[in-house]
Image (tube, coloured by chain):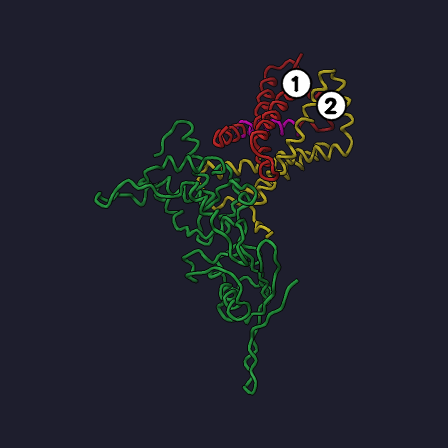
Amino acid sequence: MIRPSRNHPGFWAFVAHRVSGVALALFLPLHFLVLGLALESDAALDRFLTVADNPVFVVAEWGLVTLLTIHLGAGLRVMALEFLPWRDGRKGLIGLGAIAAVVVGTIFLLQIG
Amino acid sequence: MTPARLFLAQRLTALILVPLVLVHLALILVAVEGGLSAAEILDRTRGSAGWAAFYGLFVLAAATHAPIGLRNVIHEHTGWRGRSLEIAMIGLGLLLAGLGLRAVVAVVAP
Amino acid sequence: MSAEHTGTAEHTGQPSPPVETSLSVEIWRGRDQGRFETYTVPQRASQTVLDVVTWIQRHAEPALAYRFACRVGVCGSCAMTVNGRPRWTCRTHVSKVADDGRLRIEPLRNLPRIKDLAVDMTPFFEKWQRAQGRFTPTRSRADPLVAVSPDSPARKAADAGIECINCAVCYAACDVVGWDRDYLGPAALNRAWTLVNDERDGDRRGVLKAASSGGGCHSCHSHGSCVEHCPVGINPTAGIAGLKRRSLIDMLGGDLP
């Protein structure tokens, strides 16, 4: 099997989009179940959120916030490529999207801390 | 569902999700300051028709968008294809919608 | 396992020839089962990878199977994988790609292998037909010529894609072609796009339908590997995006302009 020749920005943008999408899709049902705890009582949700103050959870939440921003950015790039007139500077968008994700992730960590 | 219809549904829900996700991210960044509590979420959402509509739309859009995306991932990286995959994805969409709307009720019901 | 083959002749009783630099060239021999064989090839000025393969077949390994025709970059026959990238071997200078004098040459990816460096192009052309990448004429020679303005947006879109010589480099570079056996691929869809934009074609709607069916334009995820690798500078990703837009308009009841 020949390895594909794919070390270029467009491919990595796709990988980021796909990986973040799968991660978010797996996370979503868990998110809905946790929020559903409020059906029991406000206290039930509160108990979970206290547990979620521990560092493992914080890292996971940071990951999700970052993944969401990545997925949003990469998705906007795909739609720009599909619906807006083609410009060669599209690769710049990938950089912008990556920076946006880092910024959002950083703000999250600053707010948490 | 023809490829063109799936494409339209995917791109349309994506467009709907863009502003919803931006608001959601902003809320998260504000809310997590100094730790998160149930009250911080529920004080805002309980009894609010506006937040019910916001999150209801969010859930339905995400429940449509995610299975269509996963369908491509499964189709391209595993051998699974055809009718059974379509049915599984519809099932996943219904599950997400169901769990999601339940969560909306959980935080919005007064 | 690799075998060493040397083809340089020995000179005796003559003044010694100038010291030649040599290339170490690994070539895939076999089919799906097989191995890399290594050949030592004299390096020459302005040598192309096709020159290297031809030298090997003539001096070291007569049984080596490979394809070429024009050797000047207009026919599309000589495409192979060179150091991991699909390229035209006749237009690839050895000096540009041989790191430390080493080359690895394999057949194109994503196509069934026949022998050594030759692949079966049948699936590539079958998908061309499945995308209805063929012109449907409406006039006979007795009819006047159609006056097509070269400046119209449609003609410009078509012109951007018509230089394709069916070399299959984009097809070999495309990830989705590798993942989804139904995917028609960048070349076939690019051709469909040129026809959808060709006002002389008698069945543009048919082309659009064929190109947007299962395995058609909607399967493209815009990686852009085709754009990265096309030796003629065609942008199939943009053309496929055009097909996506047209297919949406068509589905929502709009007409082809």
Q: In yellow, which chain?
A: A
Q: Secondary structure at mark 1?
A: helix
Query: In front: C204, or A63?
Result: C204
Which chain did the image draw in green?
A: C
The residue that label 1 is drawn on is B102
Specify which label sits upstream in the sequence, 2 or 1. 2
- Pointer 2 residue: B37
> Secondary structure under badge 2?
loop
Pointer 1 indicates a residue of which chain? B
Q: Position of residue A23 (x, y in %)?
A: 65, 34
Q: Which mark is residue C231?
A: none
Q: Is residue C130 above or below residue B104?
A: below
Q: Nearer the viewer, mark 2 or mark 1?
A: 1
Q: Is residue C72 left or right of residue A31?
A: left
Provide residue A96's location: percent of width, then percent of height: 57, 41
Quarter location, residue C145: top left
The location of residue C49, given as percent across then percent down, is 51, 63
Q: Is residue B21 magenta?
A: yes
| Residue C157 visible, this angle | no
Q: Is residue C121 above or below residue A73?
A: below
Residue drawn at x 61%, y 63% as measured from the top left: C37
User: Which quadrant of the figure contains the N terminus of chain C?
Assistant: bottom right
Q: Are marks 2 and 1 in contact (CB under 8 Å)?
A: no
What is the distance, in whole Å, between disc 2 and disc 1 at their CAs?
20 Å
Q: Amino acid at mark 1?
A: Arg
Span colored in magenta: B14-28
Q: How many neighbours does mark 2 have within 10 angstroms: few (below 14), some (14-19), or many (20 or more)?
A: many
Name the kind of residue labelled 2 in the image. Answer: Ser
Q: Is residue A46 visible?
A: yes
Q: Nearer the viewer, residue C132 or B3?
A: C132
Disc 2 chain ID: B
